[in-house]
Image (cartoon, rainbow, N blue to C red):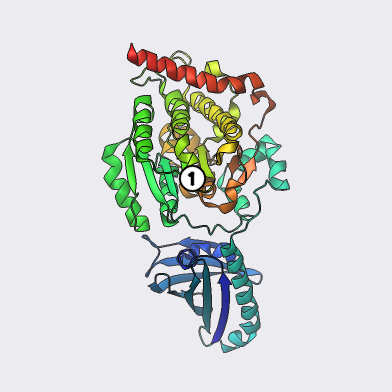
């Protein structure tokens, strides 16, 4: 048997350290040999949770199956792993040295399988070196002092060519991007997040991750019939339900206004606002208030919601974060305010969707500039091509062609989660992100809007809303 013992001390609360380390999906962020990790069992991380970790082993890769066999929150966790050639038992203990300092002791016991004692002797020095490197990585991850995000030279090169930029939208683009990712160990305990569109797709994946990270979560959904099943699904995955659920049809400004007034009356600061609710409507229809529903839900709604909740965003102790979920489809369209509301005769669902998302991207840049002195950062992101219920229902032809390269909802949602959680994600504002990197907002020169249209957008939104209000009063 080979025994490794390493001890580190970090300036983080013991609860945050325990949550991060016991979720062995994080090993790819700090273990010197881990190249992939996934959770195999349903339910919250705890005793009985199973993980698969793929590690480098010389010129090859070795799969380990881990199981948490003991778990005492904030004190210790024991994992037992099995590979083709050896078994390992990891005993990790946590000791609070103060409110914001923790000592972590990591003991790993390796045993060769099938009587391969020679393997143990030959591997001892390498394993000792690996153990020290891994714990240095863990200390760095928990220190959580990542630099300001920037696009790599490779990414800038890919964004300069339409074909290579589109390739980044696929699952392979996600895999390329994650090779450069830095650890995300930040804990969200005490952070209030407002998330729209949480019951499926990207929104559901985002909600699960934020609940796992300890956030206080308020979600907004339209259909009361989905409330119970959504909460049950959250609890099955994380052991928690959303702290609050608000019901509102966000395509109706009446509902948006009612929701905002309720939140303002409650007076709780909003640390993160995620404008995620959306849908692609292939057929033309107007809302009860007489507005084409794509423009209403995808553009007027997040504008009105965010503008009205600005006082609660200002109340955040740290820089508040607004995250607008847009779409790669917006790269096909140029902002022209007079075309944002399509008529029944010229309506095309994909075009209406793309135009609204282009406008929301421009609005993101406007807010970032206007609110720079309000301690609010505003960024947008697009998820790439993800296999969500929205794509399955609205774009079946596109899905048939691209199915083999589509991202999972979790992969599509990753950058939303990173923008909400990562300590360094509030160091930039007014940017468009994909795979945790700022990206170009235009892939073709013909889609670049002029300054007149950019400046006109806020006024157009206000005038469109006012016209709705006047119609309602008349």
Residue placed at 41% from the left, 48% from the top? 207
| Rendered location of residue 351, percent (x, y) | 52, 24
For label 1, the SS is loop
**Nearer to us in this view, 283 or 400:** 283
Residue that sits furthest to the top in the current view: 474
**Nearer to us in this view, 376 or 387:** 376
Q: Picture quarter containing residue 429?
A: top right
The residue labelled by disc 1 is: 316
**Nearer to us in this view, 192 or 239:** 192
Decide if residue 84 is in sight here. no
Label count reads 1
Above or below residue 233? Residue 430 is: above
| Rendered location of residue 341, percent (x, y) | 48, 18
| Rendered location of residue 252, percent (x, y) | 36, 26
Residue placed at 62% from the left, 51% from the top? 176
| Rendered location of residue 298, percent (x, y) | 46, 29
Above or below residue 441? Residue 283 is: above
């Amino acid at each position: 048997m080979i025994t490794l013992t390493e001890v580190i001390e970090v300036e983080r609360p013991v609860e945050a350290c325990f949550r991060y380390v016991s979720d062995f999906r994080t090993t790819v962020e700090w273990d010197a040999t881990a190249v992939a990790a996934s959770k195999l069992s349903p339910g919250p991380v705890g005793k009985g949770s199973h993980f698969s970790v793929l590690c480098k082993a010389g010129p090859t890769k070795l799969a380990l199956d881990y199981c948490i066999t003991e778990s005492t929150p904030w004190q210790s966790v024991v994992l037992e792993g099995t590979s083709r050639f050896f078994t390992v038992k990891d005993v990790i203990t946590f000791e609070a040295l103060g409110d914001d300092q923790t000592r972590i002791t990591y003991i790993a016991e390796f045993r060769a399988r099938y009587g391969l004692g020679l393997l143990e002797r030959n591997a001892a020095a390498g394993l000792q070196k690996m153990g020290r490197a891994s714990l240095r990585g863990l200390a760095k991850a928990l220190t959580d002092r990542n630099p300001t995000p920037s696009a790599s030279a490779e990414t800038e090169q890919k964004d300069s060519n339409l074909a290579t930029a589109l390739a980044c939208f696929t699952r392979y683009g996600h895999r390329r991007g994650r090779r450069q990712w830095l650890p995300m160990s930040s804990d969200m305990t005490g952070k209030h997040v407002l998330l729209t569109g949480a019951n499926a797709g990207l929104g559901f994946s985002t909600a699960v991750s934020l609940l796992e990270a300890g956030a206080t979560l308020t979600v907004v959904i339209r259909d009361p019939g989905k409330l119970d099943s959504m909460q049950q699904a959250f609890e099955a995955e994380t052991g928690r339900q959303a702290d609050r659920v608000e019901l509102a049809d966000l395509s109706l400004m009446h509902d948006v206004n009612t929701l905002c007034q309720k939140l303002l009356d409650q007076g709780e600061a909003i640390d993160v606002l995620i404008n995620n609710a959306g849908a692609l409507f292939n057929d033309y229809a107007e809302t009860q208030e007489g507005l084409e529903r794509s423009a209403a839900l995808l553009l007027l709604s997040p504008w009105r919601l965010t503008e009205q909740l600005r006082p609660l965003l200002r109340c955040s102790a740290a820089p508040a974060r607004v995250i607008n979920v847009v779409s790669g489809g917006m790269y096909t369209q140029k902002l022209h305010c007079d075309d944002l509301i399509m008529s029944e005769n010229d309506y095309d669902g994909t075009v209406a969707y793309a135009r609204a998302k282009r406008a929301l991207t421009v609005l993101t840049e406007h807010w970032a500039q206007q609110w720079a002195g309000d301690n609010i950062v505003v960024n947008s992101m697009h998820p790439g091509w993800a296999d969500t219920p929205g794509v399955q229902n609205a774009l079946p032809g596109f899905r048939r062609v691209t199915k083999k390269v589509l991202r999972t909802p979790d992969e599509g949602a990753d950058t939303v989660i990173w923008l909400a959680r990562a300590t360094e994600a509030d160091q930039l504002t007014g940017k468009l992100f994909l795979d945790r990197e700022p990206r170009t907002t235009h892939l073709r020169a013909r889609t670049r809007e002029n300054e007149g249209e950019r400046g006109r957008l806020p006024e157009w939104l206000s005038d469109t809303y006012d016209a709705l209000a006047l119609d309602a009063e008349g």
